[in-house]
Amino acid sequence: MNPKRSTLGWFWQSVTGLALLLLLGVHFVAHHFIAAGGLRDFNQVMAYLSNPIIIALELGFLVSVTIHALLGVRSILFDLGLDARWEKNVTWALTALGALTLAYGVWLLYTILQTGSALAMWTR
Amino acid sequence: MNLSLPENKKIRFLRWFDFRSWRLGMLAYILNRVTAIGLVLYLYIHLAVLSMLTGGPAQWDPFVALARSPMFLALDVLLLAGMLIHGLNGVRVALTGFGIGVRAQKPMFVALMLVGAVLLLAGALKIFME
């Protein structure tokens, strides 16, 4: 294993992990503790997302959790003892999966906001 | 096929499941990996489930009603346990990685897990009291 690369992975794992303490904390408390009934129904979700700061926090959460999760999967796979070529393949595959995950997350957020405002127009 | 192990090997194998013989560092490592795998699986299930929000209240609200049932709330508590174990143990891993408190790893791990246990209890009460 390339020691430089693995050190860098460990560093980003710590940075995103630290960010997640805050971002996941906000996310979980907001969705499971503060929300009336323990989970937000559609209108409550829309009300929550009407705050741009919340959208920024959710996007920050999406980015850090995706990086953290896939770096974690990478180090679990590397612990199986892969040769250099397979380590490279794993890294590429997980990078692609990460890009897809982020694209899906952003698309989802955008579509939810569109759906919400379309419904608000209907009921107005 | 002979499935019976020699007596001493069988004892050694069974000892694997005896947590008293686990080294604390090994326990922390196993907990970190097991919760990591669980949380990654949860992340992708969660992202898939959230696509129901694109169907508006007609699709989302029946799911919310289901997710407020006691069985789902128990899964929420399990999720909280996974997050607390992984997150608090992660604090120790990151600190040690930066060279902080390397010698105090064991008491730090025990203390963080105790904090986690208290937070889990408080969280579980909050989740079920709604």
Image: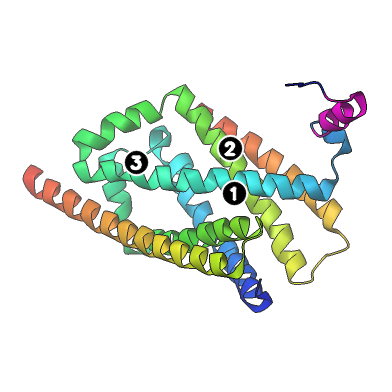
Dot 1: element: helix
Q: Earlier in the sequence, mark 1 or mark 2?
A: 1
Q: Estimate how packed mark 1 is, as few (under 14), some (14 to 19) or many (20 or more) residues with alpha carbons within 10 Å.
A: many
**Residue at image point 83% right, 57% down:** B105
Q: Amino acid at mark 1?
A: Ala
Q: Residue B9, image x and y in percent?
A: 88, 30
User: Which residue lies under the disc numbered 3?
Assistant: B49
Quarter containing the N terminus of chain A:
bottom right
Q: Is residue B112 magenta?
A: no
In this rendering, the answer to whether B70 lies above or below B31 is above
Q: Earlier in the sequence, mark 2 or mark 3?
A: 3
Question: Do the residues indicated by labels 2 and 3 lie within the same chain of the protein?
Answer: yes
Q: Estimate how packed mark 3 is, as few (under 14), some (14 to 19) or many (20 or more) residues with alpha carbons within 10 Å.
A: few
Is B15 on the left or on the right of B44, as rendered? Answer: right
Magenta: main secondary structure? helix
Q: Is residue A29 visible?
A: no
Q: Is residue A4 visible?
A: yes
User: Which residue lies under the disc numbered 1?
Assistant: B36
Q: Residue B92, image x and y in percent?
A: 74, 58
Q: Amino acid at mark 2?
A: Gly
Dot 2: element: helix
**Residue at image point 51% right, 59% down:** A70
The magenta span reads: B5-16
User: Which residue lies under the disc numbered 2?
Assistant: B123
Mark closer to the observer (2, 3): 3
Q: CA distance from mark 2 to mark 3?
A: 23 Å
Dot 3: element: helix
Q: Residue furthest front?
A: B1
Q: CA distance from mark 1 to mark 2?
A: 20 Å
